[in-house]
Amino acid sequence: MPYTPSRWEDLSRELQGLFRKIICSDGGALSMIMREAVNPPAGVTRDNFYRYCTRVDDNLHSVNARTIAASEFKNRVFIESCWDFADYQRKFCQGNSLTLHNEGFQVGSPWHGDILNAPVLFLSINPAITPRCFFPRWHPSADGIQDRFTLAGLDGAGNSVYTLTDISGNGIANDITGNCDKEIYNFLTNRFQDTCTRPDTGNLDAIVVDGNNTCQPRGREVRYWSGMKRVMEELIGNPGCFAPADHTKRLMRSVLSSEVIFWGTQSQDDAGNDNDETLNKRLDYFWEKFAVPLLKNCGAKILFLVGANSTREVFNRALCVKNGELFSQYRNRYGEEFRVAAINNLSQPPYNYTNIVKSLKDEARKPGIVRDAIAESIMQYHR
C-alpha cells in the first residue's frame, strides 16, 4: 500500500524509533557505533573496536564513546556485531570491484511489506545483499551532520545528486537525504510491489543499477521471495484469473518479511563470525532489542519461523518457559497471539511447508486467528 502521511503517523513511537535506529537516521548511539564501524580510523580493528567505542579514559577512544557507553547499546556482542556487518559489506564491495565509500552501507532490512496490515509474517535469521542493488544506502560523515542517503550510491566523481532511470523508464532522484525516513519506509513497504517480475513465471526479481544509472532486473528470481509466494499460493490458492506477474504481486500484498538480524550477510555463519556460541548470543540480543518490538507492533496473525532450526531455537530461548511459572506467547498490535509455524529455509530444498499449510487450512474451518488471516489475505488479493 503506498505511503501516506497518516500511515506514517499511525506507526507507534516504539516502531518509528526502531525503524530510524535500524536505518541509522536517528543520530543516536547505534548510529554512532555504525559510523565508527563503516569508517574506522587508523589503528582500530575488530579486536579493539569495543574498547574504542566505550572507553573514555585512554588514548584509544571515539569522540562518541561517552554517549555510546551510557546507552542501551553498550554491549560487547552488539558492538562487535556492528563491526562485523560493516566489515562484511566492505569486503563484499572489494570482492565486486567496488568501494564501500561509493556504494554506501546498505541500510538494514527491518521488514519488507506492509508492517501494519500484512496478515502473514515470514521471519528468518538474516538477509543477503546484492552488488549494485537498487536499495537504500547510508553514507556516514565524520561529524554526523553531512550524512547522505542514496538509492544507488555515489557516482564516479563522488556525487550523490544525479538522476536514476527506474524500471518504468522514469527519472527519479538518487539522493534521498532530505526525506530519507519516509523514502526508505515507503521503499521497504512497497518492495514486493515495485520490483521486477520474471516474464515466464511471474516470480519476483531484484533490481540492480547498471553503469548508465538505469534500473534493470538482476536476471534471476529471488528464491526466498519465490518460496514465500509458493506458501501463499498453498494458503489461499489462486482466487483470481490474473496474469502471472499480477497474480504474484496480489499474493505478496499479504506478506510481511523480516529478519532477526536485519543487516545484510550472505550466510548465518557471517552473522555469528563463524562461531555457534557467538551466533546464539547475537541472535538473542537482536531478538530482544529488535524482533520483539516488531512483533508487538505489526499486524500479522500467522508467524512463519523460517529456517526452522536457528529461528525456532532463538524463538524458544526467548520464551524462557520455566517449570512452575506462567508464560504468554507474543502478541501483535491488536493484542492477538500469533499462530506460529516453523518451516525449513524457503530458498532451497528440502521444503516442508505443504503439510503445515494444510494444517493451517484445516484449522481455518473454525473461527479464529487463522481463518481471519486467510480471509484478510484473500481480501488483500482482490482489492
Image (tube, helix red, strand yellow):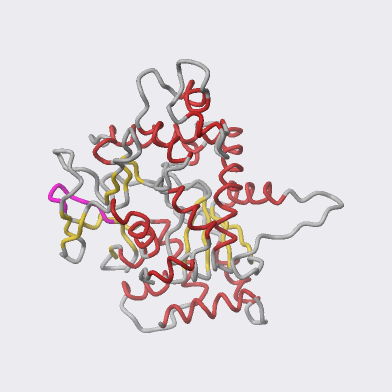
Asked if residue 200 lies in the magenta stretch, the reply is: no
In the picture, residue 353 is in which quadrant? bottom right
Residue extending farthest to the right is 324
Q: Nearer the viewer, residue 217 or 300?
A: 300
Quick check: 199 left or right of 332? left
Q: Nearer the viewer, residue 343 or 146?
A: 146
In the picture, residue 199 is in which quadrant? bottom left
Q: Measured along the vertical axis of the image, is residue 241 above or below residue 28?
A: below
Image coordinates of residue 207 in percent, x first then y, are: 27, 56
Image coordinates of residue 154 in percent, x first then y, are: 21, 43
Q: Nearer the viewer, residue 314 or 19?
A: 19
The quarter of the picture where the C terminus appears is bottom left
Q: Measured along the vertical axis of the image, is residue 62 above or below residue 264?
A: above
Q: Residue at x 47, y 77 (%)?
A: 237
Q: Measured along the vertical axis of the image, is residue 325 above or below residue 251?
A: above
Q: Residue at x 52, y 27 (%)?
A: 54
Quick check: 97 left or right of 36? left
In the picture, residue 179 is in which quadrant? bottom left
Q: Measured along the vertical axis of the image, is residue 304 above or below residue 381?
A: above
Q: Nearer the viewer, residue 8 or 191?
A: 8
Image coordinates of residue 86 in percent, x first then y, are: 39, 35
Residue extending farthest to the top is 59
Q: Total of numbered circles in the picture?
A: 0
Q: Residue at x 42, y 71 (%)?
A: 6
Asked if residue 212 lies in the magenta stretch, the reply is: yes
The quarter of the picture where the N terminus appears is bottom left
Image coordinates of residue 204 in percent, x first then y, are: 34, 63
Which region shows up in magenta?
207-213
